[in-house]
Amino acid sequence: MSTHEVKNRNGRPLGCLAMTAIVAGVTVLLAIAAVVAIAAFSRQFSGGHSHRYVAAAKLEGGEDEVPLLQEVWSSGASAGTKVVRISLSGMIMLNDDGWMDDAASATAALRAIQRATHDTSVQGIILEVDSGGGGITASDMIYQALQTFKKAQAGRKIVTLMGDIAASGAYYISLPSDTIVAHPTTITGSIGVIMQTYNIKELAAKIGIRDETFKSGANKDILNPFHDVTPEQRAMMQGVIDALHSRFVTLVAQARKLDEAEVRKLADGRIFVADEALARKLVDVIGYRTDAEQEMRKLLQADQINVVRYTESGSWLDLFGSRRGFGMSLGAFLKPRETRLMYRWWL
């Protein structure tokens, strides 16, 4: 027997027993951690945690039309005029890829807006935005949802509170607001459209990769990274970008009551710090959440407001599913990113 191997009375190496004990201990600890995590998740989304839930109106409609969300008291007086606080951060994209996906926050924000729209007791939305923008259609869908919220009931108001960044598509979705509040350190603007791709034609030739594309027309594979973009195709794509850019400029001019020619001068993609954005009339107030709430009180002519926010209803099983905003969907990690037109600050 090796001098480094010690046995117990039954002849088994003590090292093996120790290793078995360590593995068993780690397994038990992991099991306990999993149980605690699942319990915490279940409490959070089943109403069992310490948040104070408030009575919500029972609304008629399907899940996609009127999402099933729980109301949590956020701030203000319970007897005040009801206002919903909705947060949107990160990339503005909409899909069902689930937990940890870029789309989770924007999708949740859209669902919250839809819920608030159908609740006649809701008089206002405080939209907290911290985003560099995102998809053109996703931004426009949220913009339209906010417009619908206001049109659904007379007297409703929207106040946007900008965070670190509220640029491009994030500024676009702020346009339905009656008042835009920027933090003193906010960066906003970047009014424009961007689309990017790669040309790897020369690299592919050097390493022996050849493209074989079968297509129905000369422009069917426009922006194919294995081919140069022709002047005609470049003009075609620039025309699309210019049209979408013009829509953005027009909406800014209408919402901010500015001359369209003046907006176009600012809409070359440049960004603005809060003070400059205020001077350019792109925002209305520089302040903080308390200032946003004060602006809402003034707009609603209310002595007090009752600010609530929404949480998703769910159970711990949703961790492993693919519900919107939940689950560890493998597709979120494996799906390739597409080349697409974006209302997005490049950074």
Image: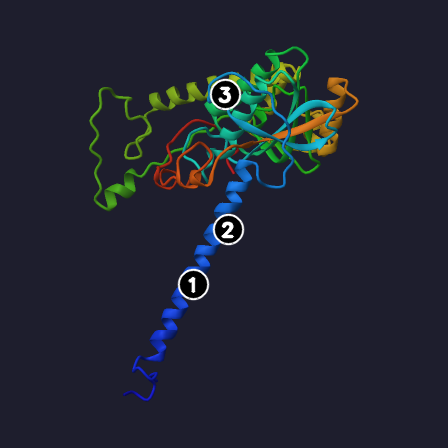
Q: Residue at x 57, y 17 (%)?
A: 118
Which type of secondary structure does the marked residue at label 3 adopt?
Answer: helix
Residue 26, numbered label: 1
Q: Where, by quadrant of the figure, is residue 259 drawn?
A: top right
Using the numbered discs, state the Cα–Cα distance from disc 1 to disc 2 in whole angstroms: 15 Å
SS of the residue under disc 1: helix
In screen coordinates, is 53 left or right of 217? Answer: right
Q: In this view, does 44 lie above or below 213?
A: below
Q: Nearer the viewer, residue 243 or 340?
A: 340
Residue 34 falls left or right of residue 223: right
Q: Quadrant of the N terminus?
A: bottom left
The residue type indicated by label 3 comes to Met
Tag 2 secondary structure: helix
Residue appearing at x 63%, y 41% in the figure: 50
Q: Which one is earlier in the sequence, the residue at label 2 or at label 3? A: 2
Residue 341 percent across, percent down from the top left: 43, 26
| Residue at the extreme front of the image, as rendered | 10
Q: Name the residue under label 3.
A: 141
Quadrant hosting residue 262: top right
Res 127 → quadrant: top right
User: Which of the two discs, 2 and 3, sits closer to the camera?
Assistant: 2
Amino acid type of the residue that numbered disc 2 sits on in the rendered structure = Val
CA–CA distance between discs 1 and 3? 48 Å
User: Which residue bears the numbered disc 2?
Assistant: 36
**Residue 314, position in %: x, y?**
48, 35
Q: Which mark is residue 61?
A: none
Q: Give residue 175's position: percent from left, percent from top.
A: 61, 21
Q: How many labels does the image show?
A: 3
Label 3: how many Cα within 10 Å (few below 14, some 14–19, many 20+): some
